[in-house]
Image (cartoon, coloured by chain):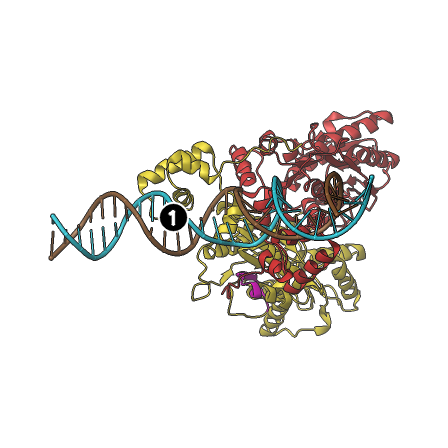
Chain colours: A red, B yellow, C cyan, D brown
DNA sequence: CGGAAGATAGACAGCGCTGTCAAAAACATC
DNA sequence: GATGTTTTTGACAGCGCTGTCTATCTTCCG
């Protein structure tokens, strides 16, 4: 029904009531220096009494900042949800808002569309998740508009923006060591999607750890994947049909570990007795299935916090990033659950 | 680094280049009537050449509409992700944007916070998911600001806004019938969270179908739940420890069905041989686990589309909703998978 | 061919706020 | 008490756009 289009309380109203200029009110609500303590108190009082809230559009237009932060994602779901939660939490505390924008990586008009968004909204910053954090059309558009960015777990280096990542590589090595400790030697690996640094890191760490522990890597046991259930299902089926099938499978994320579980179940292979399975990310489902999945907890929400904090701390002063670029490397945690167990010698 | 603060192309620039007034340019970009076809073409041409995009903030400020739609959620995840995707898709096509705002239902300052947001952002509309669609502080704040709303599957009626829902009740009856057809008579039920219409509807439909088919409902087999895994796990454990335990359990959503599966597995109860389990919502995981869960597919994304479409179609003209309120009732689909099977007589 | 009606265009103000700069007030100094 | 310095405040323009209203130009009709 959209009733009563009541005119909202404006800065004018406050100024009038407080007997000061609008500029002074502006100073108070923005916590700027140079206002007498008494005046400040009086204005603050009136603001409260009148229940005044500045109009963001007007602030944006006049002040050339939007109080909006973009989050570019490929598709929602998986870890993105947690991440988003983290970002929103911090944004809200700081009076910012989050605009979630999904993009399809291959889109030929991507650049135009991104530019369109940026020009229209004047975002104060953008957080780029993989694979967008390495996507030239997107990066170019952002650079062209001079929008500050934060990249999460990118592949390529750039000197112009901070990077936040968790230590995938170390985590993956530890996870591999976990499998090796359990006696597994014949270990299969399902890769993630190309274009994600996690894909390369997790695989490389797997190979390095195996090698360092003197276990030769069987490259025929490294199967393709793309972080989805369906693709992993195919790889799992192939791998488990091998005459000398692996005693353990390291899946590059939880959803793919789920696929391995499903295939194993269907083939009558018991987990963890006959096959150990590990995931990555500690998504909620990893503990809702049976057996619960051994996985790596990435501090996804914390990464979200960090990203938001960085952008918010930057935005008021348009001075660019501080000199040592404030990159962050966050901790992870290996979570051993039911899907991994000691290798059983009776086969072969 | 936030380089080159290049001044963006404005409507002025276009007007100058096209030798018309800014107002005419405005007419063209907003597709308003009253512009000569020739002029329109010329302006459109220049707009393209200059790669001009109107500044949303300015449009909002001057035009009293924000091109922003709010989506109020309790917490992300579950079906919300799909819903969000649907809304974003339509918003983008129409030049709108989505602002996702999670709220904690019990928050004593809820009203203030919502008002704050509304006054600051001037949203063109808000979509309310359960349980917010029945939350007085939120509804009051929205009404006070005259923001149009769409409510998804609310409990209470209100004449002032459209409602979109899928036919929970019918779906739940059919699902119950499915269980009855398989020969189950001793059926357990795990309820959803209070404050959601789905909770009441799904339960009532279950009771009604049972009753109609002449099967007496054992109220001791109706267990509490809140749509979460953890709570359902407790209920499932209790239920399956009963001396005369049910041969089927109807869980009010997929996550809780997962819990039943996990408990059954742990207790050595086979699904579906010894126990049939059904979920609700057809979330992605319902087919990623083994056995895959029999569930009800709700057209969550389509509901998102519909909600966005309604709001967008309303917003340009501030005339309020059309007369028969455009409520929508969407279709569902029962998806029979592996977690349900015929009852086996050998027990007792 | 005069005048009414309709189509097209522009002038202008102003949405609500902040940046800039100058004025006023308060305080220091010798 | 005159002068310099700092603090506090306000006037004013303008961010980029749209709503309103008026001016101009066409067209149509008796």
- Judged left or right of residue A334, residue B259 is left
Give the number of callouts. Answer: 1
Q: Nearer the viewer, residue A146 or B294?
A: A146
Residue B119 appears in the figure: yes
Report x, y in % for residue A157.
Answer: 70, 27
Please tell me how crowded label 1 is: few (under 14), some (14-19), or many (20+) other residues with Cα within 10 Å.
Answer: few
- Quadrant of the image for the C terminus of chain A? top right
Tell me the quarter of the picture where residue B1 sits: top right
Tell me the quarter of the picture where residue B181 sits: bottom right
- Judged left or right of residue B126, residue A217 is right
Q: Nearer the viewer, residue A323 or C25?
A: C25
Report x, y in % for residue A334.
Answer: 83, 41
Residue drawn at x 56%, y 39% as measured from the top left: A118
Q: Is residue B331 above or below residue A311?
A: below
Identify residue for label 1. Answer: B32
Report x, y in % for residue A184.
Answer: 84, 34
Residue B176 appears in the figure: no
Region in magenta: B143-155
Chain bearing mark 1: B
**In magenta segment, residue A125:** no
Report x, y in % for residue B249.
Answer: 69, 63
Q: Nearer the viewer, residue A235 or A315?
A: A315
- Tell me the SS state at disc 1: loop
Tell me the quarter of the picture where residue A17 sits: bottom right
Q: Is residue B8 above or below residue B128?
A: above
């Amino acid at each position: 029904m959209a009733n009563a289009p009541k005119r909202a309380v404006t800065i004018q109203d406050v100024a009038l009531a407080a007997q000061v200029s609008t500029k002074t009110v502006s100073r108070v609500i923005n916590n700027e220096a140079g206002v007498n303590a008494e005046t400040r108190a009086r204005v603050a009082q009136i603001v409260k009494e009148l229940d005044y809230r500045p109009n963001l559009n007007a602030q944006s237009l006049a002040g050339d900042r939007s109080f909006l932060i973009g989050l570019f994602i490929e598709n929602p779901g998986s870890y993105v949800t947690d991440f988003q939660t983290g970002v929103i939490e911090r944004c809200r505390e700081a009076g910012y808002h989050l605009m979630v924008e999904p993009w399809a990586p291959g889109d030929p008009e991507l650049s135009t569309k991104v530019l369109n968004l940026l020009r229209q909204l004047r975002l104060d910053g953008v957080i780029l998740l993989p694979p967008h954090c390495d996507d030239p059309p997107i990066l170019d558009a952002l650079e062209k508009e001079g929008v500050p960015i934060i990249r999460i777990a990118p592949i390529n280096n750039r000197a112009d923006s901070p990077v936040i990542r968790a230590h995938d590589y170390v985590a993956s090595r530890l996870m591999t060591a976990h499998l090796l400790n359990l006696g597994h030697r014949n270990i299969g690996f399902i890769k993630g999607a190309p274009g994600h640094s996690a894909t390369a890191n997790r695989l490389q760490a797997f190979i390095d750890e195996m090698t360092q522990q003197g276990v030769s890597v069987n490259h025929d046991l490294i199967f393709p994947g793309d972080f989805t259930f369906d693709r992993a299902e195919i790889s799992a089926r192939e791998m488990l049909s091998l005459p000398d099938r692996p005693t353990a499978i390291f899946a590059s994320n939880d959803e793919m570990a789920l696929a391995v579980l499903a295939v194993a179940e269907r083939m009558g292979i018991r987990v963890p007795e006959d096959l150990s399975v590990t995931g990555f990310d500690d998504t909620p489902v990893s503990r809702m299935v049976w057996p619960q999945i051994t996985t790596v907890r990435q501090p996804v929400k914390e990464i979200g916090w960090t990203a938001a904090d960085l952008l918010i701390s930057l935005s008021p002063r348009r001075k660019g990033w501080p000199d040592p670029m404030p990159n962050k490397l966050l901790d992870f945690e290996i979570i051993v659950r039911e899907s991994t167990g000691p290798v059983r010698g009776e086969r072969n």
